[in-house]
Image (cartoon, rainbow, N blue to C red):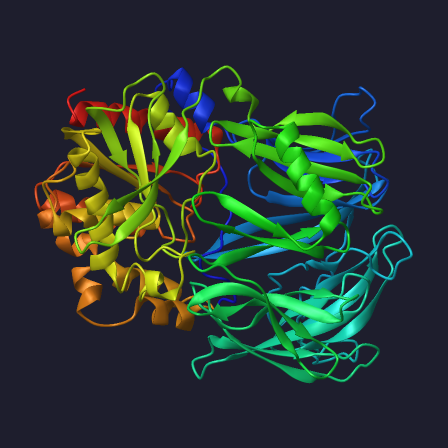
Amino acid sequence: MHKAVFLAGVALAATAAHAEPSREAKAFGARESIQGISLSPDGKKVAVLLADGARGQMLTVSDFSNNPLKAILRNAAGTEQLDYCRWTTPSRLICHVSMQVNDAGTLIGFTRMFAINDDGSGLKRLSQEPNSFRALNIMQSGGAVVDWTGDGSGGSVLMTHTYVPENTIGTRLANDKSGVGIDLVNTVSLSRRPVEQPRTHAADYISDGIGTIRIMGNQGETAGGYSSDTISYSYRKRGERSWQTLGQYRVGMDAGRGFNPIAVDPTLDAVYGFDDADGRRAVFRISLDGNLTKQLVVAHPEVDVDDLIRIGRQQRVVGASWVTDKRRAQFFDPELAKLSAALGKAIPNLPQIRFVDASADEKDLLLSASSDDDPGRYYLFHKDTRKMEEVLAARPELANIKLATMKPISYRAADGTMIPGYLTLPVGTDGKNLPTIVMPHGGPGARDEWGFDWLAQFFAARGFAVLQPNFRGSSGYGEAWFQKNGFQSWRTAIGDVNDAGRWLTQQGIANPGKLAIVGWSYGGYAALQSAALDADLFKAIVAIAPVTDLETLRTEARAYMSFSIVDRYIGNGPHVREGSPARNAAAIKAPVLLFHGDEDSNVRVNESRLMRDKLRDAGKKVELVEFKGLDHQLDDSAARAEMLDKADTFLRASLGM
């Protein structure tokens, strides 16, 4: 059985030759310039991971002294993805890289870690590799950092180590350990020693941010050899080595069930995490002194609290945030609460402020600021001098393009329920009688929120109004809103999506003859499945990497450890057939345009091929555009530009524009 993770892939590679896309398609299709950014411990340097060409990456470093970013490493082949690079000393960085391999049709993901000096020298692998010819299994995970302070000596980290047992025949040197442990690794000398012995079912380790592992999660296996849907968490009292029971968390493709520990606060001797509070996700804190006193920290009566705000090398928890019409935050740290408010006034046109990184003493803060009509920029703020300097813009390609504003709205569904969403209108229009797109989000266990959205902005720039509904089945609004999820409760979810189109027409925003639907992943599923409830509503359908058959989706998951979780999420019953667009192709009247990467490990390209074939068999108008070597995100500027250009041309032709 392949020990890979379902619904986790990396988007890579090139595209087929095509006609030159429009200027707007190139500008909006360009990947975000800044793919990662980190501040050195002394606050004097910044490392920036930049997009390089259509799909490459470039690691750069600057010391802020009017010197341009200097490239120290390039990743241009497209076979690997640099996920992040962070400082461990004022002159050395750790980088995490991921890749995937096609093994007889099964896409298997791998990760590795390496260290590099800030001048590009001293590149060394940190991942501990098994003895390849004796290994009894493959090592997919090359480790992850769980504590950036290590032993406090500078340059050391605590990172996971996956042990692969080896064949012992003919040798006494083979490794017989298996599972995941923790090593203390010095990124400069490369010395390492185990601090937590491997455990076969270890799935999670949480440190206190100052060098001590305090929490461990174990995830067993089902009788069929798949990962269990339950993680059992244990904790250590301060200064002790023995483990005590903390609780259980049921893993799901939604918010899960039970207390999900996230971060330990060593000062309070407690762990922060998420749990249910009156049907909605909230932040709780549990003491680790042996009493397990549980305290509700932050809850909201209307929505889930979905994020912990953490800062610095210790990743200390300083607040929490949630989304109503826009993202809001509550800071536990009084100084940061005041600073956040002050920064909001200092940068009034960029209200979305996020603390990205900090120097070791937290006197220098790296932050990003953005809005709905500005993809944002990064700043360095100096607490001592109260001065702020701009570092880089997130998407320089859009600097000279006037972007549209996004307005929170709500509309009434057929059963009277008010559905929240976001409406983006083309710049300079009166918002009436427009060609209009309903754009359901992916997931379905996800949601849209106010802020810059490159896909919605492109279509707005091309003259379309765009409505992004947070239909029932979306996350963020509590358990009742999520229902059974957007597959098992597809009639409700898709009904809400269709009601968005009807509302747009009723309000006079949409020209009813020029109403289309566009979606990615689950959104693509929703776009196709919309015709099962009302085939006459949308006049054109664009589906990017869509799920098209629920039984096929289940079958795809069998090669991965998370099959039992996916199987439970899809469920069984009539909805599997009734809720699968490929099995209802005859109901679709509108022309369909499909896009899919042929290395997609989230939703295999066979689903779009199946949809194309079923539509053709039913005599429908359909086109499938495949991108060779690309995964679910189509993370290639040339591919995205081609996709945007083709989608725009298709919509204009289909809607008679």
x, y (%) of residue 131? 71, 66
Residue projecting furthest to the right: 153
**Residue 16 horizontal side relative to residue 203, left or right:** left
Eyeballing the image, is 573 above or below 331?
below
In the rendered view, tell whether residue 107 sits above or below residue 56.
Answer: below
Quarter of the image for residue 301 reads bottom left
Q: Residue at x 68, y 46 (%)?
A: 337
Going 62% across and 72% down the picture, which residue do you hit? 295
Image spot of residue 469 (x, y percent): 31, 45
Q: Residue at x 89, y 52 (%)?
A: 154
Residue 356 placement (x, y as % from top left): 67, 42
> x, y percentage for residue 231?
55, 76
Residue 131 visible to an observer of this rendering: no
Q: Quadrant of the C terminus?
A: top left
Q: Give the total number of marks visible in the rendering.
A: 0
Q: Is residue 258 above or below residue 416?
A: below
